[in-house]
């Protein structure tokens, strides 16, 4: 069994790992096509679906499909040690140790024991959303932060020509209105006017690691999970799903 | 009753609100002439006197004098959400809700419930100080920080040609001497050499929110309150009064 | 008894004092030749040897050899108040008070009581190390930080043509390899291949205050103390010694 993955820029992997804060552990699956992960957060309210294709790597050798069980705290600590111009080489040693080597001015190798996390697999969710809006990650992140100072949940409403994000408590409320033709909107597709409510703590985690320059695809329908899809290099992507709050 | 106030730069209001950390709640009074506030801190050692004239606003409509009771923590949280190029519109809705709207790339509206804080009014203090010195806020702030590492109180002494700020404890002391003709002094007016002592924790609050570029008017006399007056845009000003420490 | 020392740049003394975090108190000795300090940390595992020659000062007057017992927390607090272009004047007043005056836009004087710390003197260690490597402080600091996320101790191995720093725990390990001809190496002198283990918490303290541009001389032998020598201005230097971890 040979697994060797080389990224020319260690920061790519650093950003991915720092985006997975909803999870404690992760079962990455490395195969011929690339490395992927599909997992639910411990409270099973949110799902993460990640894929980075073999093409994104400078070198990618995977002789057979392999599961890599990783403690994400440990891997985050290691990735924080990446220097600004380091390349990253990840290599499987035997069956239970992953070596992560930074190649920069010096060679710095970290080894971590892999975990046996079982084989629980999740099918890719197949949701037909009535609303698909592509906007800057920055705009979404700011609306989430606006709502966070008001309450625990955010209502997202898509109308024919605007996206409205709002939150309220007994003494305060907030309403963010993003017009269809605003500069922060790249695509605006509303098949059916929709309204749903989601947990802010989850949305906050999902939007906090993202980079301001990115666009995010936001998709949802009334009483359905919201989907946030962030592009990564070379056709890779990171998708979050979050269950709606049941309104009574 | 109509009250609508538009500031072209939300940061102006942000700085004002962040300067009021001595107060928990504030009873702003909006009238034809502008918006003002006169309040004592909860322990009644310090007073804040604030005024921003109608002219400072891009649009200012106030059909009758109105009291706006505000929880300052809540308003601070909202003002922290102001973007760097946002304009701020504040509007009274009914009699008990204030809507604060940021106009930037998007429109973001926050509503807060107003509080009934009663009508306690304070006359403007009328103190004839023997010493009036205008100096950079930076110089005053640094002297306060120097004194804070030494003790709880600062002694301020104005002599014919220098201002001396000092503090001491059993094992340490500090003395900051600012000459009359120093670059940090803009005006130096000592009718009578004076010495008084003030609480550092209050002076620290009063000087911490200020901007380094500003000048501050410092006025005091022996055993009398100290007055710190900071200019705001368009003839507005923020004045703090702090009772002296009674020396035994 | 006259003691007066003037440094044109207060930051020099600030950096020295901030490098002495291993000590709580220090008995500086001022003499004709300059100011020096030799002390062990409270747990007696590490030693600090510091010397700043009279030449490093703009003005240096010392009429007789004097001991200055200093609480380093207090002196650190004072040095943090140094402005970016302040000069520092230190002067002994009587026998038990040191006045530290910053000369910048204003004159700011801090006085601290000196402590009587007794006369315990330590001879300069005289260790003949088999390995002497001069490298950038940055490279050493990064290797220490890499090892800190793994364990409590670092193993340092000098081979004919490389320096290897490593650490391990049950589930993780790290290995930093610095080649003899790497850009971060200025001198590489290995008389005998050597390996020893040291406490990371001490090495972390020793390397954290240093500036990235500096070179550090690292000297050690198997089962012997490691010595880290940092140059200061005008031929001054700060040397740390750290006992090895006894391996069982």
Image (cartoon, coloured by chain):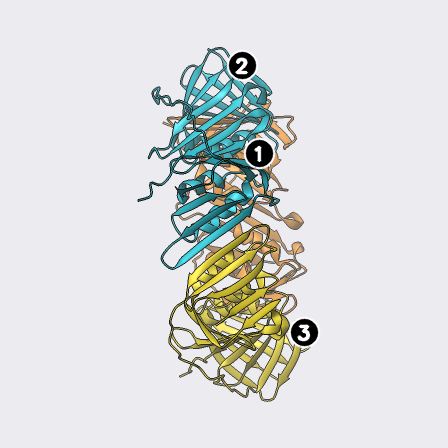
Chain colours: A orange, B cyan, C yellow
- Residue beneath disc 1: B83
The circle drawn on residue B61 is 2
Whole-percent x and y of residue C202? 46, 71
Q: Is residue C201 visible?
A: yes
Mark 1: secondary structure = loop
Q: CA distance from mark 2 to mark 3?
A: 70 Å
Whole-percent x and y of residue B89? 54, 22
Mark 2 packing: few (<14 Cα in 10 Å), some, or many (20+)? some
Q: Residue at x 41, y 58 (%)?
A: B172
Mark 3 packing: few (<14 Cα in 10 Å), some, or many (20+)? few
Q: Is residue C177 left or right of residue C74?
A: right
The chain to which mark 1 is attached is B
User: Decide: marks 1, 3 in contact (CB < 8 A)?
Assistant: no
Return the residue found at the far left. Answer: B248
Q: Nearer the viewer, mark 2 or mark 3?
A: 2
Q: Quadrant of the C terminus of chain A?
A: top left
Q: Residue at x 59, y 64 (%)?
A: C7
- Residue beneath disc 3: C182
Viewer-proximal residue, B18 or C150? B18
């Amino acid at each position: 069994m040979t697994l060797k993955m080389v990224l020319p820029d260690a920061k790519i992997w650093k950003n991915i790992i720092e985006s997975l804060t909803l999870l404690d552990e992760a079962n990455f699956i490395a195969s011929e096509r690339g490395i992927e992960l599909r997992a639910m957060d411990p409270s099973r309210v949110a799902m993460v679906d990640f894929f980075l294709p073999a093409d994104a790597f400078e070198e990618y050798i995977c002789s057979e499909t392999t599961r890599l069980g990783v403690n994400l705290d440990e891997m985050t600590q290691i990735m924080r040690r990446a220097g600004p111009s380091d390349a990253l080489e990840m290599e499987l040693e035997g069956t239970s140790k992953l070596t992560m080597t930074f190649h920069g001015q010096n060679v710095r190798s970290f080894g971590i024991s892999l975990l046996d996390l079982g084989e629980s697999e999740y099918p890719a969710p197949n949701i037909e959303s009535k609303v698909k809006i592509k906007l800057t990650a920055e705009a979404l992140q700011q609306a989430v932060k606006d709502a966070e100072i008001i309450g625990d949940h955010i209502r997202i409403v898509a109308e024919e020509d605007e996206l409205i994000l709002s939150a309220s408590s007994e003494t305060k409320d907030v309403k963010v209105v993003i017009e269809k033709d605003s500069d922060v909107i790249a695509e605006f597709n509303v098949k059916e006017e929709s309204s749903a409510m989601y947990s802010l703590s989850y949305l906050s985690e999902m939007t906090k690691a993202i980079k301001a320059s990115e666009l995010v695809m936001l998709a949802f329908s009334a009483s359905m999970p919201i989907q946030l899809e962030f592009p990564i290099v070379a056709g890779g992507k990171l998708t979050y799903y979050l269950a709606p709050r049941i309104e009574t």
